[in-house]
Image (tube, helix red, strand yellow):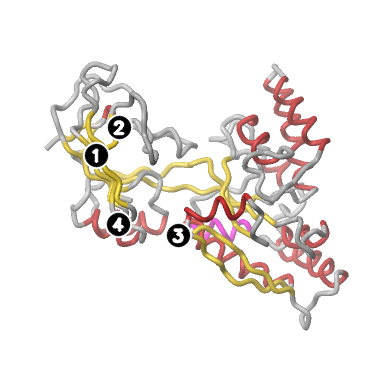
Amino acid sequence: MVVMFKPTVPPRNPAASKYRVVPTPIGTGPFKFAEFKPNERIRVTRNPDYWKQGRPYLDGIEYTIIKNLSTAILAFVAGKFDMIFRYSVTAPLLKDVNSQMPQAICELTPIGINRGLIVNRERPPFDSPDLRRAMALSLDRKAFIDIITEGQGDVGGVMQPAPEGLWGMPPEMLRELPSYDPDVQKNRKEARQIMQQLGYGPAQRLQVKVSARDLPFLRDPAVLLIDQLKAVYIDGTLETIDTTNWFPKIMRHDYTVALSPAGGGPDPDQNLYVTYGCGGELNYNGYCSPEVDKLIDRQSIEADPEKRKQVVWEIERKLAEEGARPIIFYDRRATCWQPHVKGLTLMVSSIFNGWRMEDVWLEK
């Protein structure tokens, strides 16, 4: 998705707010819903009754929907759009923007979103903890970062790693968790031994379908995941799913193995309850541990930040030991805009609250 602005008078004193477009929008935001054409565009117009006097500065915004990110980049470089959809430019494509349009302003930021392996624990043979452990041991996290993000990602656990993440486990502790040993060959040797004990091997390989949302920054790491699983006698085929179908599909557990994103913060409550708690709203693979639930409650009521951090790390260890939802890596993506776009504020470590469009204006 790319963005075209409609300008009005430039500002003098920018501040901040946000808005969100929904199918049947209501509210008192800086912009009003105007039009939605599936797979084409979304348009919003200035709200003359907005509570903050003088805002927004733009008459409107048009979001053009372009599914292929490379095509969107080409259109941006050609000057057809004012900016690229926020946090959508991958590290390889950022190089293209910088080489083809050096005057563009781009910021590569940590977005607080990880890529994780989820397994349907209800479907044999994946109801076996040993099999799930072997899958986690197959992961070469550094390879994901080097190939997918050209070295711009981070190895982390359930909570986003430092320095951006305030609750992430230190690297020296993280390396002690199951499957985080940097000696990938040793990990995979252990994984193959587990698989052989389960009856698999070079002549008896496990066939599996690996599902992923049909977006490049999710589809590409899913392809690499399939390649790495081959090292432990698991042959996968990729199933790409449109975003509109993805969430209903995984929420009803209509998948076997999938690569799925999840937030890693900023606060443990925001992450742990919904993603790892029994019955959590985003607990797509059905992990449930009463012991972990008690620890999640315990960290939530702990007032001392350092003591709370120790409880969070204890939860990290248990989740890794039980293979709850192996975290592969944390992504970093860029936002690019034309130099005439002013007043734009990007958030760090969040893709959800960075839409402060009421302060944006054009200098043309």
Of the two numbered discs 1 and 4 in the rendering, the one whose residue sits closer to the viewer: 1
Task: Point out residue 226 in the picture as x, y percentages from the top left corner.
Answer: 61, 68
Image: magenta residue range: 140-150
- Do the numbered discs 1 and 3 sit on residues whose CB atoms are within 8 Å? no
Q: Secondary structure at mark 1?
A: strand
Q: Give the labeled residue for mark 3.
A: 216
Q: Residues within 10 Å of mark 4 (few under 14, many from 20)?
A: many
Q: Which mark is residue 61?
A: 1
Q: Inspect the image, locate mark 1, and give the three-letter code of the amino acid beneath it.
A: Ile
Q: Give the labeled residue for mark 4.
A: 73
Q: Which mark is residue 357?
A: 2
Q: Residues within 10 Å of mark 2 (few under 14, many from 20)?
A: many
Q: Quadrant of residue 225?
A: bottom right
Which residue extends farthest bottom? 203
Q: Inspect the image, locate mark 4, and give the three-letter code of the amino acid beneath it.
A: Ile
Q: Is residue 192 left or right of residue 93?
A: right
Q: Quadrant of the C terminus?
A: top left
Q: Which mark is residue 102?
A: none
The correct choice, above or below, for 211 with respect to 167 in the image is below
| Whole-number angstrom distance, CA of label 2 to CA of label 4 | 21 Å
Task: Point out residue 180 in the picture as x, y percentages from the top left corner.
Answer: 71, 52
**Mark 2 or mark 3, which has the lower sequence index?**
3
- Do the numbered discs 4 and 3 sit on residues whose CB atoms are within 8 Å? no
Q: Residues within 10 Å of mark 1 (few under 14, many from 20)?
A: many
Q: Inspect the image, locate mark 2, and give the three-letter code of the amino acid beneath it.
A: Met
